[in-house]
Amino acid sequence: MATTSALGDTDGRGFAATAPLDLALELEREAPTPLHEQISAAIRRQIVRGAWPAHMRLPAEPDLADALQVSRGTIRRSLRTLIEDSLLVQVRGRGTFVGSISIEQPIGQELLSLAEGLAREGIAFETEVQGASIGSPPAPIAALLELGESEEVFEIKRRRLIDGAPVAVLHNFVRRRFCPGIEANDFRRETMFGLLERVYGLRIASGRRTFEAQAASREIAEALDVSFGAPVLYLEQLTYLDDGQPLEYSDVWIRGDRLKLTSVLSRPAATTT
């Protein structure tokens, strides 16, 4: 039997006045998935999708338990799972708050694709293909890729999502001469680097990445589900084969509130003057 319930800003005890909390949750009480896992999964979706912003206070545990018709122990177990995942933070005497959700990515220090970085961390993601074609790229990109006369590229636009929420937009240009027939592959399931290496036997040996903050264009804002002009992280990438030939160029726009890039740096040994 399923039970549907909703929580709203009604009693003033567990809510920030400026951030009402709405939770519509259907619990499958006869399902094999424990109730505490169903509740934590539902809360996780709300946080990842941005419906529950960082620093918003949750209702008190008794209120959650009453609204969802479960025991306080079940609620406590659900919240503990999310606290261990750093999605929630408990402050003694003040309550439980939504944490800052940003998934660390090592692509600022290693030549990993975004998909490879997420897979390494065990984070499930989806890919939407928004368009693909074969043809000539804009002149600046053709110059960077050192294209020969009449040489074509495979161009593809994709979007990465985590728990249904967009986190990145990718626009790739790949030299088709190195990977004929690449357009026949299903990029909803295939990753670009993985396909080039596994299927075409190419060795991606090096690359250059440039990072900058940008204001989201209307197209990017719509794709990332942010406001027009909102700050996003832009990444420009150019990758090379082991013989030094450029292979792929890409533009990537990332939601900085969902993903953050990390670098592990070492300082060179001090020199004497």
Image (spheres, helix red, strand yellow):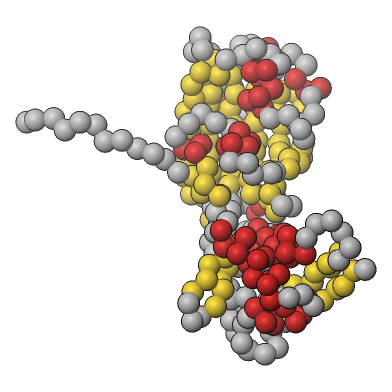
Name the residue located 62 percent from the left edge and 60 percent from the top edge: 81
Q: Position of residue 2 (x, y in %)?
A: 90, 69
Name the residue located 78 percent from the left edge and 60 percent from the top edge: 34
The residue most toward the left is 273
Q: Position of residue 208 (x, y in %)?
A: 47, 28
**Residue 147 picture quarter:** top right
Q: Is residue 107 above or below residue 207?
A: below
Q: Is residue 88 left or right of residue 41?
A: left
Q: Is residue 238 above or below residue 26?
A: above
Compare residues 212 and 84 and report the one nearer the observer. 84
Name the residue located 63 percent from the left edge and 89 percent from the top edge: 12
Compare residues 53 and 250 and report the one nearer the observer. 53
Q: Is residue 109 left or right of residue 148?
A: left
Compare residues 252 and 21 and report the one nearer the observer. 21
Q: Is residue 162 left or right of residue 184?
A: left
Q: Is residue 181 visible?
A: yes
User: Quick one: quadrant of the N terminus?
Assistant: bottom right
